[in-house]
Amino acid sequence: MSSRSQKKELVTEYRRQQILDAALTVFSRKGYGEATIPDIAREAGVAVGTIYNYYPSKRDILISVLASRVLSEPFLKLMEQSPEVDDKAFLRALVQDRLTMLSQNADKFLFMVGEVYRDQDLRRQWVQEVVQPTLRRAEQRVGSRIESGAFRPMNAGVTARALAGMAIGFAVLAMIEGEESPCKGIPTSELAAQLADFALMGVVAVGSGSPQNLE
Amino acid sequence: MSSRSQKKELVTEYRRQQILDAALTVFSRKGYGEATIPDIAREAGVAVGTIYNYYPSKRDILISVLASRVLSEPFLKLMEQSPEVDDKAFLRALVQDRLTMLSQNADKFLFMVGEVYRDQDLRRQWVQEVVQPTLRRAEQRVGSRIESGAFRPMNAGVTARALAGMAIGFAVLAMIEGEESPCKGIPTSELAAQLADFALMGVVAVGSGSPQNLE
Amino acid sequence: MSSRSQKKELVTEYRRQQILDAALTVFSRKGYGEATIPDIAREAGVAVGTIYNYYPSKRDILISVLASRVLSEPFLKLMEQSPEVDDKAFLRALVQDRLTMLSQNADKFLFMVGEVYRDQDLRRQWVQEVVQPTLRRAEQRVGSRIESGAFRPMNAGVTARALAGMAIGFAVLAMIEGEESPCKGIPTSELAAQLADFALMGVVAVGSGSPQNLE
Amino acid sequence: MSSRSQKKELVTEYRRQQILDAALTVFSRKGYGEATIPDIAREAGVAVGTIYNYYPSKRDILISVLASRVLSEPFLKLMEQSPEVDDKAFLRALVQDRLTMLSQNADKFLFMVGEVYRDQDLRRQWVQEVVQPTLRRAEQRVGSRIESGAFRPMNAGVTARALAGMAIGFAVLAMIEGEESPCKGIPTSELAAQLADFALMGVVAVGSGSPQNLE
DNA sequence: GATGAATGAGAATTCATTCAT
DNA sequence: TATGAATGAATTCTCATTCAT
């Protein structure tokens, strides 16, 4: 008896995933506005009506796709980083991971930017449940390094966002430039190393005459 | 006679602007997919049919809006920066300017991200005519500073993109976090100063024990 | 063996009633066109599929509901009136009963008026099996009172329909006027008395000067 | 200039009527629930989209049809009756007129019974603007006849509703019985005469022994 | 050129009915 | 027999585009 209802639940859950996967694919390809329910149904291999047995409207599909596939999933790994390695190795690995992830998921991210920005509830939920916890984690790490004297005294919140922003912005630029980017030929590991160095040491040559220039 | 045709041209040009402004407003508010021609007509104060006397289709309006309002204008200022001040002041001013611009135009940017990414021609045109010239200029500046020994030896292309990306990514995060951001209370000039310092000197405390940690 | 099959039949019959009751409730509330099979299933506490084990289509449910719940039941009582009391008491009791019945079942009647009118077979069946037997009975009663000289010489068929129509029409008006009706505050027994007097004696004051006016 | 906009308004008004007429026809034939917008468009000889340029939803079409074609129009004549003729002639003419009108418009009435009953706003509006003014007029007439001693002392409100109800109920029964009604062969003028006599004098034979029976 | 009513293809959504379990 | 997920035709409604005035 339990097995019967368990089985049914499994099938139901599988359908849900099937539909979300299909929706993500279609949204990525055509954007939310241009995607149609028949598109999603075809991609999922189910009938149009079936979709409505699982989600009450197209917008609800979007919400579910974002919640379960786009807005949190890619961030999960980021939250689990072991803090035990040294900064440089950590940062290189992190940046490399981010770049890889972003370039692999660029299409899956871009379709939702406008939608999330426009839907206040969606934005707030995402910010509170995903973005801010992630940033807070980075902030804490930066803060503890500052306390230990390893990092210069800085505003940890701003710095964490500058670091995260650098990775995101760099990846976005790479995405936009596409094949025409001069970074295209450089291996990701090398890019990550350069970015990590930039973040750790900045651009100024230490011991050069520049510091004077700076003040 | 000439004045007659000149006048006509002026009116025509004015109408074009009127329609583009209205379209930008509506696209920003609702997104391209959800915006309708009647929306734009209402916003512009003209009849639906009039719009089709100036643009052959909704998509063409999008193209024109992006080309004339979104993709270049905000970057024009970037190209005009005087390079004669010292690095720190320059960077602070630049970053502050970018942050202000982005926060003022966030809504105007976000609606088109997905659209541009999906339209290859549009993306390529934008990249070649606007993005790359701007980045190349930054790259040259970084390159000359490296040559002069003011900056550490680095890949100028990567570094220029890391700098630009940091500003863009930071602003995007601020936009996403909105009111909930811990940076919300900090004056833009102060934020710009922190970001500029981060870019110039990195996070590591010079002379600390960290450098060993780093290697 | 017999008890097994009897039990089964009982259950089957019970289900049928369950479904018809639910259908009547839902049809009354939303009308036939807007009522859905899931609505009825929910109301009946059975699954959608179960309904199709008992009735082959939504239209068949309507037919059964009308036949067993709406078109005959409320008229059955009418046939059972004892004819042995005097006219005035009889008419008062009858009218009061009709008014009470109609006001209690108004919602159950109204949803089907259009449906029945449109379905010729349904209408004819109802007329032949229910309406006409009832009216014929009233007609006979009026006829016998005319023969005995108690009623004026009149067309018994027309008069019977005028009497029945008065009760029905009065109740319909009361239903339509709802709370706003000036009859709202009058007790049903008083209303019934007035209507019965009207039917028996008409409106004209006997012995008044009006009769001249009338000819 | 004025003629231009006047012309346009005329066309607009004509379209509105065209659509309402078509909707009335289709609603009458199929009922509101089963009627479709393409049905109405076809009947009106316009495109589906055109309908939506004039009415925002199917329900709004219903409301307009009821307001302009069904709920008031047939009642207008009733309000204009000249009160100067004698009661019998007046009542005969009135009843005949009602019977004719109802039998000609039966199909147009029946489809809306359930809809009006279910839509509180619609019902209330109809009652206040059409039904009650009409009934009040009848009530006043009955009241003045009572005062003059021509009618017996009665509750004028109840009596007016009994009279109106009789005409309505009689017509409804005739509609329901259709071809099978024994009244089918009787000319409308004769029916009206019988009903008027019934209303004026009741069923009881004056001077018969019945009055004793009645008390 | 400007206008806005008309158009109809196409979108989201509903729901009667089927059928495997 | 009971169930309820799956189906897809049918429905309401939208809107880019056309075109007569």
Image (spheres, coloured by chain):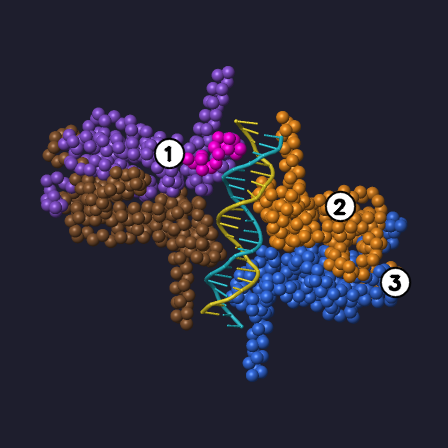
Chain colours: A brown, B purple, C blue, D orange, E yellow, F cyan
Query: Residue C142, image x and y in percent?
Result: 82, 64
The residue located at (45%, 25%) in the rendering is B13
Q: Chain of mark 2?
A: D
Q: Is residue B128 above or below residue D140?
A: above
Q: Chain of mark 3?
A: D
Please state if D205 lies on the left or on the right of A184 as rendered: right
- Label 3 sits on what residue type? Ser
Please state if B59 lies on the left or on the right of C43 as rendered: left
The answer for how far apart the CA atoms under marks 1 and 3 are is 99 Å
- Label 2 sits on what residue type? Leu
Label of residue D208 in the image: 3
In front: C126, or C92?
C126
The answer for how far apart the CA atoms under marks 3 and 2 are is 36 Å
Q: Quadrant of residue C75?
A: bottom right
Query: Residue B97, image x and y in percent?
Result: 29, 31
- Label 1 sits on what residue type? Val
Q: Residues within 10 Å of mark 3 (few under 14, many from 20)?
A: few
Which region of the structure is painted magenta? Answer: B48-63
